[in-house]
Amino acid sequence: MPDSLFYAKAVRGTSRLVDHWLQIGQAAPDRLAMILADTARLAGLGEPEATPDGATLHAWSRDDRPPLWAARTALFLLVQMPSRPVPRDACEGCAWAYCWLRNREFASLEAARDALPEHLRDTLEAPLAEAWADQRARRLV
């Protein structure tokens, strides 16, 4: 049962992850949406059918669950920001860990943790372990 709780938190956290990008990205929402879609395509994190607009990005950051490419790309962009953002709550932390494992291949939990930026290692230690266990159980598809 704890594994399924992790997955539910991770799914809820994807909206918070997109919201984090929307809140600290330094551009208008339409521009942030374009950056998200273009980065997804260029970094191989997904193939958006169309480039969303700012209103769509706002909807994804609230009640509408974003597509996985959007959450994965938001994480990709957030971990590269010089301001060194961290998850703001437990659900967002689960989404960060979920997307971290989806964005790259890792041979072990330790390798996944070591690949994190230094400022995220302690914060994401527990959610990353949960995400790893859930992935190994083949729930993260």
Image (cartoon, helix red, strand yellow):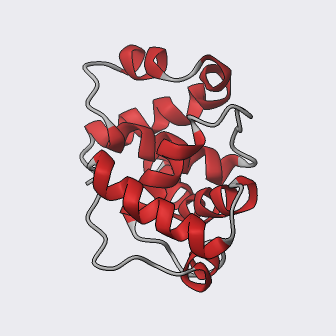
Residue 3 appears in the picture as rendered: yes
Is 138 drawn above or below residue 67 in the view shown?
Answer: above
Q: Percent from the top left, x then y, of residue 11?
A: 49, 62
Q: Residue at x 66, y 76 (%)?
A: 62
Q: Is residue 4 visible?
A: no
As drawn, is 107 to the left or to the right of 1? Answer: left
The part of the image, by quadrant, that contains residue 109 is top left
What residue is drawn where x is 38% and y is 33%?
132
Asked which quadrant contains residue 39, the reply is: bottom left
Front-lying residue, 32 or 61: 32
For residue 11, above or below residue 2 = below
Q: Does 54 appear above or below 114?
A: below
Residue at 60%, 31% (x, y): give it: 124
Which part of the image, by quadrant, shows the C terminus?
A: bottom left
The location of residue 133, given as percent across then percent down, is 37, 35
Residue nearer the viewer, 128 or 2 = 128
Coordinates of residue 13 in the picture (x, y in percent): 59, 59
